[in-house]
């Protein structure tokens, strides 16, 4: 993303490196955590809810 600074929609911290998933910015650290999280992990449902919210908000535009 270059030198742009964004607020991560997962951890709510200001970061420089990351991706946009629709309108939600996800920092590199959270992206790695999401990818490596097993469905049995306690954080799995948290990530599912965050991503589900992105999907639902894209339909209300």
Image (cartoon, rainbow, N blue to C red):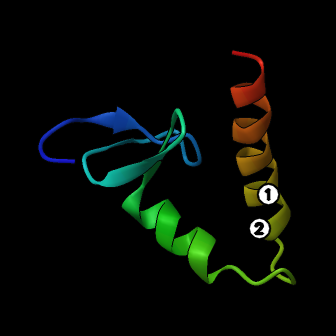
Residue 19 x/y as whole percent: 39, 52
Q: Is residue 44 above or below residue 10?
A: below
Q: Can you tell which quarter of the image residue 46 is in? A: bottom right
- Image-based side of 13 in relation to 6, left or right: right
Which residue is the site of mark 1?
48
Q: Which mark is residue 43?
A: 2
Residue 57 x/y as whole percent: 73, 27
Figure label count? 2
In primary-sequence order, the first of circles 1 and 2 is 2
Query: Circle 1 — which element?
Result: helix
Please name the residue shown 51% across and 61% down the image. Answer: 30
Query: Circle 2 — which element?
Result: loop
Depth check: 35 or 42 in front? 35
Depth check: 56 or 8 in front? 56
Depth check: 59 or 23 in front? 59
**Viewport quadrant of the C terminus:** top right
Q: Which mark is residue 29?
A: none
- Image-based side of 34 in relation to 45, left or right: left
Q: Are marks 1 and 2 in contact (CB under 8 Å)?
A: no
Other residues around mark 2 within 10 Å, as few (<14) / some (14–19) / many (≥20): few
Please name the residue shown 77% across and 67% down the image. Answer: 43
Residue 24 x/y as whole percent: 53, 38
Q: Can you tell which quarter of the image residue 14 is in? A: top left
Q: Is residue 23 above or below residue 35?
A: above
Please name the residue shown 13% across and 47% down the image. Answer: 2
Q: Residue furthest top?
A: 61
Residue 25 x/y as whole percent: 46, 41
Please name the residue shown 19% across and 36% down the image. Answer: 4
- Image-based side of 15 in relation to 45, left or right: left
Other residues around mark 1 within 10 Å, as few (<14) / some (14–19) / many (≥20): few
- Of badges 1 and 2, nearer the viewer stands 1
């Amino acid at each position: 993303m270059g030198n742009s600074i964004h607020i991560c929609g997962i951890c709510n911290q200001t970061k420089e490196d990351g991706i946009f998933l629709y309108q939600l910015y996800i920092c590199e650290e959270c992206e790695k955590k999401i990818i490596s999280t097993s469905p049995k992990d306690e954080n799995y449902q948290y990530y599912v809810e965050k991503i589900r919210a992105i999907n639902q908000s894209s339909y209300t535009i």
